[in-house]
Amino acid sequence: MKVEKLDAFFQPLTIIVVSSSIAISFGYGAVLVNNGIITVGELITFNVYLNMLIWPMFALGMFNIMERGNASYDRIQNVLDETDDLNDIGEATVKETNFNFNEVTFKYPTAQHNSLEDITIELNRGETLGIVGKTGSGKSTFIKQLLKIYPEGSGDLIIDGVNISSLNREKLRDKLGYVSQENILFSRTVRENIMFGKPDATEAELTEAIKLSAFDEDLARMPEGLETLVGEKGVSLSGGQKQRISIARSLIKQPDILILDDALSAVDARTETRIINHIKDNRKDKTTIIITHRLSAVHHADKIIVLENGKIVESGTHQALSNGSGWYSKQNDYFITGGES
Ligand SMILES: Nc1ncnc2c1ncn2[C@@H]1O[C@H](COP(=O)(O)OP(=O)(O)OP(=O)(O)O)[C@@H](O)[C@H]1O
Ligand SMILES: [Mg+2]
């Protein structure tokens, strides 16, 4: 702001100084010529030299351009110098996708408290895990451990007998289909957004993914079908449509591990049931992790865990948990009675 203020002051000032110097030299010069002290030629010469001096004077004042460039360059360099905190040196690959969380504790680098504490859980290939709990209880954080987004905390996260730190991040992510809580869509067509999950997918695979994610009915109503442009971040779509495109994108690659992070929050109950049934039928021998605020999405899960402040406070099947007296059964009753009890 200081620089801009000075600039705003100096620009008109220089114009005034330059103009008045020309006015003075011609005015006073005319008097001198009239009195015979200088010739007309001398007056013209003087003015030409004066004009030649203006630009170098301006240039002297432009030193601050260099300073500005320096400041900008420093900022860019800071970004370019940033390294990956994770230093992914792992080489091993994932085969079977059996997970073992063993007392995993994790704190975000900027946080005061642990966001996950002593998480111990086992999940075998083909099983479905449901994760529920209040907002901010650590559900998404749990998933981010699997994705290797943050440096590991303490405890062991073992996949197929190998510690996650020895697993290659890219190869691990190849196995995963992840629908994040925030839908990330690109300003392209519906087709391109779905095919992003598997660029070499066939037309049949595309149709299948659309069917599984229950997007077929919506698609029929879209002006240009698969070629409809979704706009920046999918502005021209409804929340539920965005979610289902994201689900189709992850289903098209038939991942060994499917992770849905609150991915059904914006679809109606009937559509949710349709998608869950498709997933159940289609992924019998594959692992699925479903995070949700609506318990109906995890009724069928082999295991359900309830998180609170980063800890597992309850775990079991839907049947066992709803017969208990914890958060899950209260939440379940609330859904059944509509919160009137
Ligand atoms: N990048 C971050 N840095 C610091 N703290 C974070 C970060 N992300 C999340 N947290 C904290 O970790 C805790 C768990 O967050 P998390 O996103 O896992 O909650 P969640 O269970 O997924 O909630 P929701 O149901 O609202 O999605 C919260 O208290 C949150 O404030
Ligand atoms: Mg979350």
Image: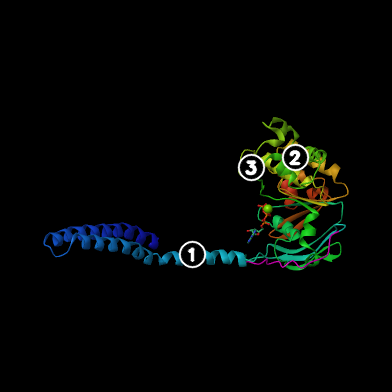
Per the rendering, the mark at residue 234 is 3
Alpha-carbon neighbours of circle 1 within 10 Å: few (<14), some, or many (≥20)? few
Please give left or right for residue 77 compared with residue 258 in the image: left
| N-terminal label among 2 and 3 | 3
Quarter of the picture containing the N terminus is bottom left
For marks 2 and 1, give the CA distance. Answer: 54 Å
- The coloring applied to the image is rainbow
Please give left or right for residue 261 compared with residue 67 in the image: right
- Magenta stretch: residue 89 in it? yes
Eye-nearest disc, 2 or 3: 3
Q: What stretch is highlighted in magenta?
A: 82-94
| N-terminal label among 2 and 1 | 1
Per the rendering, the mark at residue 272 is 2
Residue type at tag 2: Glu
Residue 63 horizontal/vertical position (percent): 41, 67
| Residue assigned mark 1 | 69
Residue type at tag 1: Gly
Alpha-carbon neighbours of circle 3 within 10 Å: few (<14), some, or many (≥20)? many
Quarter of the picture containing the C terminus is top right
Q: Front-most of 218 and 185?
A: 185
For marks 1 and 3, give the CA distance. Answer: 37 Å
Image: 298 above or below 226? below
Q: Main secondary structure of the magenta part?
A: loop
Eye-nearest disc, 2 or 1: 1
